[in-house]
Image (cartoon, rainbow, N blue to C red):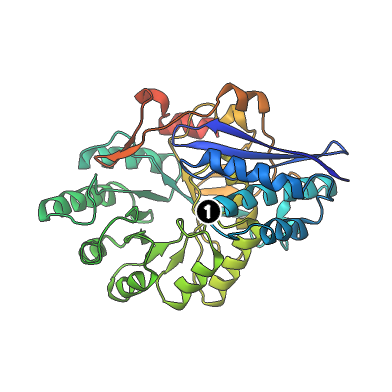
Amino acid sequence: MKITSVKSHLVDFFRANLVLVKIETDEGIHGWGEATVEFNDQAVAAAVHTASKFLIGKDPFQINRLINEIHRHSYFRTGVILRSALSGIEAALFDIKGKALGVPVYELLGGKVRDEIRCYANAWFTGARTAEQFALKAQDVVDLGYTALKWDPFGSAYMDLTAAELTASMEIVEAVRASVPKHVDIIIEGHGRFNQATALRVARALAEFNPLFFEEPLPPESISALGDLRTLSPVPIATGERYYDPSAFEALIDANAADYLQPDVCHVGGMEQLKAISALADSRFIPVAPHNPMGPVANAMNIQLAAALPAVTILETMMSDVGWRAEVCDENVDFQDGFIAVGNRPGLGIEVNEDACRAHPRKDYVLRHFNGQLTDIRPQNAAMDVSQTLRAR
């Protein structure tokens, strides 16, 4: 079997443009991967195109050899664009190999350690402004079966919070905590934007609500600062989505900077790299909660990893995805009682509809945080409500 073509589809997906990678072979077997990088989709697609010269005519089964060759011949050797391109390419190669052998990718990663993975809801709060609105939306998510939910209650604050802003944020947290059963975990998103003093104030204020973790309290540039914060924080700290080099995760572990690691399989260079990061975490008994706000192919990649990696404890899912998600990919997610079941279809277990990809071409976005909500140049009804999203998935 030889690789005959490598191409990318850039697909409008409301929050960003997906970068879906397709690799075809001379035996008619093809594979899909995802290399989405928020607001840098064209750069990643160009990197995939550049890497294709190392792939055409090669044996797709030699996954590590091919990825290593691309990496070796990349002058800068790292960076989120290169490593994301590698992620999409490698996943497509795994998909081909799994399909050719008739096995799911998790069998190529060592086999299953679980049959289902717990997941939490994100983006369920779209449109909420008041504590009461957040509480009502949280109840809707729990009614759908979720046992964990994440959100950002801090509005458009950056670096500092006034006393009034902190009080308002904690009123939202208190309202949500009171509105859902005690067995439901809450997760607080910081979006990497507070200074050290403010992040510590927030962490101390959150302690009474017992969050599963406080995500990205600080900007990612200083791992040592995050280590200092974790030492003082009364609540668990999570981070990892903005790190793309595996060495950064080793540094996070060495600095005792995180209670949960959140690598993104679309950014770290592939499934094998996330597996290596997970092994490092596992050696220090640190749970892994992969960052997963991307598209359906990335979700399939993460489910395969969650099936095979003992350290993975919970997976992120999005509740505001566009209605054409089901048109683009036949992911057929089996969600019940807060868990996603691991399927047994060969490869990644999904297929992408190229006609649907072409029907929703990339768009230029002007996104910003405005009162805690993502807004863009498109109509506000572009996002779906929670119940519509779950049916579509």
Front residue of 127/34: it is 34
Query: In percent of the image, x 61 and y 48: which residue is there?
Result: 85
Tell me residue 86's x, y (percent). 64, 52
Tell me residue 97's x, y (percent). 79, 50
Query: In percent of the image, x 11 and y 51: which residue is there?
Result: 164
Identify the residue position indicated by label 1 in the image: 80
Q: Amino acid at mark 1?
A: Val
Tell me residue 272's x, y (percent). 66, 61
Q: Is residue 235 above or below residue 149?
A: below
Q: Where, by quadrant of the figure, is residue 83 drawn?
A: bottom right
Q: Is residue 81 above or below residue 220?
A: above
Q: Residues within 10 Å of mark 1 (few under 14, many from 20)?
A: many
Q: Where, by quadrant of the figure, is residue 215 drawn?
A: bottom left
Assign a secondary structure to mark 1.
helix
Tell me residue 111's x, y (percent). 72, 61
Query: In percent of the image, x 23 and y 63: which residue is there?
Result: 208
